[in-house]
């Protein structure tokens, strides 16, 4: 029986492939996350190239820091680390999957006011296929997110469709060519909410989003989780880290197998690193950048 989600909410997730839960993170935690995020932006002023912590917008300078992403912020600050085990998040995932939960990775996507880059349509499953589909991304809204400031968009029900081709010119490019896809992007819904809301989206759901043309920053902490018996088809598992990332439930050596459509993210992208870099290879785009 669900403990946080009603059965109707579980059914919504199964039908649409995503959910938004308001007031999941306390105002105190959000205020701390906002403060720590401002500190990251200050630190990024002295950085000129992407590194292990920062992914920069092309026009980033010391005078006008344009930080696109902080990679795995939980490794660099305890406030972010605390969110990984947030009890509300773990309960929601247990409600959806009915199994133990393993943490996978995270990123803080920034979408700076008036600039923040768009992200082309993609399925996370294209980047990391597994033995079953019980993987999801939980997004903590650090700012209020609306249609005007670059909300992520999701095509409802697309998690029940095919795995789309994410290659361009025969190279894995981390995005779907809108000319070739049969997905109905006109049905996409913006995933909006007030700061403190969380979103959860299914690993096979098609999602992307526009640039942030508004005067309001949109900072969104995205945490990737998988069920305890969900094993990667390609990632090399560091055994100690794998076990340490089991947050609830019991360890298992028996992956749960499901017959699912899979395409491997190969041949490797010409522009490595983050999804933004991978997508530089895409020539046919759906979203326009705020500044071109
Ligand atoms: O930041 C967003 O709006 C979407 C994030 C996303 O899909 C990604 O980083 O893979």
Image (cartoon, rainbow, N blue to C red):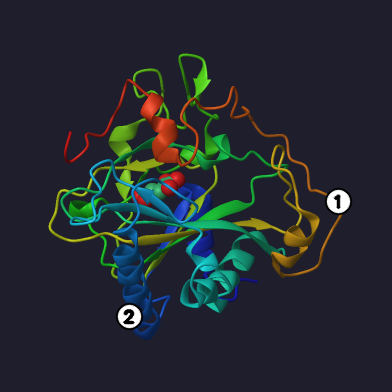
- Nearest the viewer among 44 and 130 is 44
Left-right relation of 69 to 107: left
Q: Is residue 204 above or below residue 152?
A: above
Left-right relation of 246 to 201: right
Identify the residue at image location x=28%, y=34%: 186
Does any atom of ligand 1 lie closer than 8 Å to the CB of label 1? no
Q: Residues within 10 Å of mark 1 (few under 14, many from 20)?
A: few
Image x and y of residue 67, in percent: 31, 54
Identify the residue at image location x=17%, y=53%: 148
Image x and y of residue 168, in percent: 45, 19
Left-right relation of 48 to 63: right
Q: How crowded is mark 2: few (under 14 residues within 10 Å), some or many (20 or more)?
A: some
Q: Which mark is residue 31?
A: 2
Identify the residue at image location x=34%, y=82%: 27
Q: How far apart are marks 1 and 2 (CA)?
A: 41 Å
Q: Residue 254 carries which label?
A: 1
Would you identify the image quadrant in which residue 156 lies?
top left
Q: Earlier in the sequence, mark 1 or mark 2?
A: 2
Figure quadrant of the C terminus: top left
Residue lying furthest bottom: 28
Q: Is residue 177 above or below residue 17?
A: above
Image x and y of residue 63, in percent: 18, 57
The residue tagged with tag 2: helix, strand or loop? helix
Left-right relation of 36 to 113: right
Identify the residue at image location x=73%, y=42%: 131
């Amino acid at each position: 029986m669900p403990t946080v989600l009603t059965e109707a909410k579980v059914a919504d997730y199964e039908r649409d492939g995503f959910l938004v839960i308001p007031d999941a993170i306390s105002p105190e935690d959000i205020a701390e996350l906002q403060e720590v995020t401002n500190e990251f932006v200050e630190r990024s002023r002295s950085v000129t190239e992407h590194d292990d912590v920062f992914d920069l917008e092309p026009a980033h300078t010391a005078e006008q820091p344009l930080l696109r992403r902080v990679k795995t912020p939980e490794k660099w600050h305890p406030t972010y680390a605390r969110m990984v085990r947030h009890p509300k998040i773990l309960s929601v995932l247990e409600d959806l999957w009915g199994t133990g939960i393993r943490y996978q990775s995270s990123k803080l996507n920034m979408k700076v006011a008036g600039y923040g880059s768009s992200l082309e349509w993609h399925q996370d499953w294209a980047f990391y296929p597994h033995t079953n589909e019980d993987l999801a991304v939980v997004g903590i809204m650090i700012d209020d997110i609306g249609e005007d400031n670059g909300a992520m968009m999701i095509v409802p029900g697309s998690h029940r469709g095919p795995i789309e081709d994410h290659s361009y010119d025969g190279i894995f490019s981390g995005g779907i060519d809108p000319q070739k896809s049969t997905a109905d992007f006109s049905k996409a819904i913006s995933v909006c909410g007030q700061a403190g809301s969380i979103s959860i989206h299914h690993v096979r759901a098609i999602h992307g989003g526009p640039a942030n043309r508004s005067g309001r920053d949109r900072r969104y902490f995205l945490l990737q989780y998988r069920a305890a018996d969900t094993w990667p088809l390609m990632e090399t598992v560091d055994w100690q880290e794998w076990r340490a990332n089991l947050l609830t439930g019991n360890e298992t050596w028996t992956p749960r197998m499901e017959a699912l459509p899979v395409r491997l993210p190969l041949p490797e992208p010409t522009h490595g690193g983050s999804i933004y870099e991978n997508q530089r290879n895409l020539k046919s785009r759906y979203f326009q950048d705020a500044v071109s």
